[in-house]
Amino acid sequence: MPDGRPDLFTPTVSREVTVGREATARFRRERPTLRWVGVLTPIAGLARATLRLDQDETIVGREQDRYSPGYDESVSRRHARITRRGDEFVLEDLGSFNGTHVEGVPVLSCVLFDGDTVQFGQTLYNFGRILEPARPAREGQP
Amino acid sequence: MNGLTVQFWGTRGSIPTPGRHTEKYGGNTTCVELRHGDTQVVLDAGSGIRQLGAAWMQETAGKPIRAHLLFTHLHWDHIQGFPFFAPAYRKGNSFTVYGEQRPDGGIRELLGGQMRGSYFPVPLAAMQAELSFHDTAPEFAVEGITVRTARLPHPGGCLGYRLEVAGSVFVFATDSELDGVALNKDAVQADHAAPREYEPALVEFFRGANLLVIDCQYTDEEYAGRRGWGHNSIATVVDLCRQARPDAVALFHHDPESNDDKVLAMADETARRLESAGVTGALVFAARERLAMKVEKPTCPLALPAAAPR
């Protein structure tokens, strides 16, 4: 029933709003594309190399060139998968022999948060995330 | 076939608590998924069931979903996600729903009640999946999984569930204030550190779980001001575990006022006190949204040797 209240279900769009939206869209186009990168930093145990998780999917294991925790027989060949979805990194154990522990808990899968400890075999890592440009910045550009 | 696996989809008590300070342990209310082979069981339909439903829809890619929903009780934080459980709206899916008959109705009427009239725009009848509703018996079987129930002390009542299959024992005891049924409750009220004495049947219900998921909403200090609200404190959980000896304990039903740091501190404190009570080797942790694990005696992480010299 009409009762004098404005009908906000069919709003009219003013010219000022349209101009404002175009400016916002321009601003957004000019922003650099950013992506989250996960970092597993060894804090105790055998391995010394930091594992940089800059792909949408990373397999950690003894026979994975870039993502091997070094020479550690207690790490399975394909030990765990870490999937990046936006700012979220999901870890899944791939049926490893010695398991994957997050904060000391043996997990099948788990969302990782900054500061979590993750153990593969005989190395304990600290997990953290950094935000960085998706492509290297060109000179003169942000 | 292997034993059960569990995944937490909602661990928070009372009301959804989104935000940065609760994102690690989670802000969604009670929902826990159990699997044994193709058998899927869901405990409660708090707000966490929305994400579970979405995950199932993605995983099955149109194939029929069949599952069993077990309700502990019908307080809002245990049913509020049900209207947002997408698989229930898809024809071809089927769900067997178990809950306790209440003075004000059965499980069908009460679940449907929150989807009626002014509460929600879509009625229960709009759910196209095949839904069958059952009163929860003291003991029954779900596709080979033995399910036992116990009445837990909570305002209005709450069911605890014990599920066993293939050597895997899972006990779920959300929303409970066990001090209320201690045989020496006056002594416990006078001295919160006093050892609790329970009916043997109660301890037996909890005994020997591979994983015990238990309400531990309050610190002992908080509990002093919230007696009768229906939730446990750390001292109660420690004392129960001393008697029931689970392999692993997941603290559950986190208080909406507890941020991630506090939830972690409560788990650490519980572990420390359990060890002081002579219970060594039990894994104690705070239930964490979306964490999945096997229901078995937990494996310890390997010892950490010193790194080889560079």
Image (tube, coloured by chain):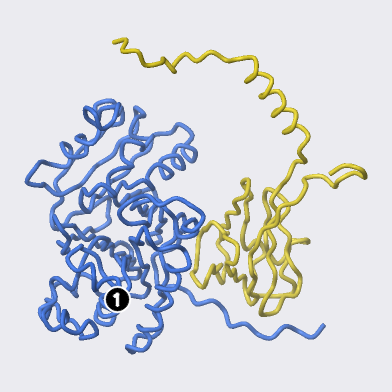
- For residue B155, side relative to residue B301 (left or right): left
Residue at 40% x, 73% y is B266
Give the drawing colour for chain A: yellow
- For residue A134, side relative to residue A45 (left or right): right
Give the drawing colour for chain B: blue
Residue located beneath label 1 in the image? B220
Q: Position of residue B101 (x, y in %)?
A: 11, 47
Q: Position of residue A53 (x, y in %)?
A: 71, 57
Residue at 50% x, 15% y is A11
Front residue of B203/A59: it is B203
Q: Indicate whether A90 appears above or below B86.
A: below
Mark 1 Cα-neighbour bin, 10 Å: few <14, some 14–19, many ≥20: some
Q: Quadrant of residue A90?
A: bottom right
Q: Position of residue A124 (x, y in %)?
A: 63, 74
Q: Helix, strand, or loop for circle 1?
A: helix
Q: Quadrant of residue B175?
A: bottom left
Residue at 41% x, 15% y is A7
